[in-house]
Amino acid sequence: MKKLLMILIFASCFLKLNAQYSINDYKYVIVEKQFHFQNEPNQYNLNELTRFLFKKHGFKPVLESDVFPSDLKSDYCLALQSEITAKGFLKTTVTISLKDCNNNIIFQAEGTTKEKDFDKVYSYGIREAFENFKGLKYNYVPKNATANNATEEVKPTKNSSDEVEQLKAEIEELKKEKEVKAQEKVAEKVEEPKSVFEDNSKKLKTNNTYFEAVVTDNGYNLVDAENKKVIHVLTKTGMDDVFTVKSNNGLVYKKDGKWLLEYTKGKKTIVEILNIIF
């Protein structure tokens, strides 16, 4: 009798443990922003690929670098932590582990590939590992759901044509995100134009003469304030605070609160600071 009682208690605990670790208890999957075998976040677009494949299999993936949903912020245990590792030389094995907030492994899948190209091997391995997700039939069920809600009839899955269209849309979304990130990286690399004060190829001069700007039909005449002679004739260019100079084919423009006259003399570019009174 005691033996039978012990068996029943053990069986009860085992069933409770399995119920506690059901994959359907978790609403989100957190995807690492950088795997251990990457030199930088999202190298070869692998992290975005992983998020895409989780989404394809019905999960709600969230990148570590994303802003978490409010319910996940208040309850981290709503999510499984995805961890991807890779090992091997002649044959690479990629392992995807899903762990709960207590670091228990809830699900694990492996994919192997003999691909040698470094920028393809992990992509192929990850895709192979995700083939094991097909039989999961993941469907999030909140822990506080009623028995009726938990036993509701599952809606029929989309037909193959709908799935193809959904995949196409998701692929296009990934492409757009990748293009935006590429443009942001290019923008970061573009240097700000040097100030004329920092450009050694330009010789900066200070003109001590004060000029009065006399309005004309298409610009200004700069008149020497002392001898009242017209020194420069400025013509509008269509851009604010930029004028062409008739006398030396140069430009007068405003930069950092100063009016500058820029022209070429021989092989040198001369920049003069003009004192203009409007």
Image: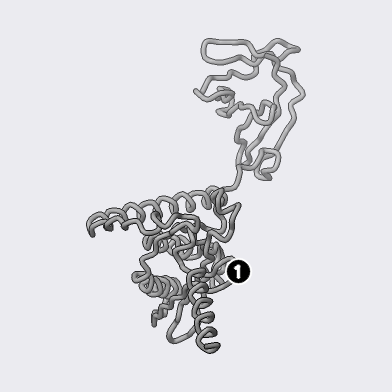
Near-viewer residue (213 or 265): 213
Task: List x then y, in percent, for residue 125.
Answer: 41, 75
Q: How is the image coloured?
A: one colour
Task: List x then y, in percent, for residue 268.
Answer: 63, 41
Near-viewer residue (70 or 228): 70
The residue carrying mark 1 is 102
Looking at the image, is 103 positioned above or below residue 205? below
Looking at the image, is 115 positioned above or below residue 219? below
Q: Residue furthest front?
A: 1
Q: Is residue 176 left or right of residue 255?
A: left
Name which residue type carries label 1: Asn
Near-viewer residue (144 or 36): 144
**Residue at 42% in and 72% down:** 126
Near-viewer residue (263 or 109): 109
Instruction: Name the quadrant containing residue 58.
Output: bottom left
**Residue at 30% in and 55% down:** 155
Task: List x then y, in percent, for residue 147.
Answer: 42, 57
Q: Is residue 241 left or right of residue 227?
A: left
**Residue at 53% in and 81% down:** 10
Q: Quadrant of the C terminus?
A: top right
Q: Residues within 10 Å of mark 1 (few under 14, many from 20)?
A: few
Q: Secondary structure at mark 1?
A: loop
Looking at the image, is 262 positioned above or below residue 182? above
Task: List x then y, in percent, for residue 21.
Answer: 50, 70
Instruction: Name the quadrant containing residue 123.
Output: bottom left
Numbered label tally: 1
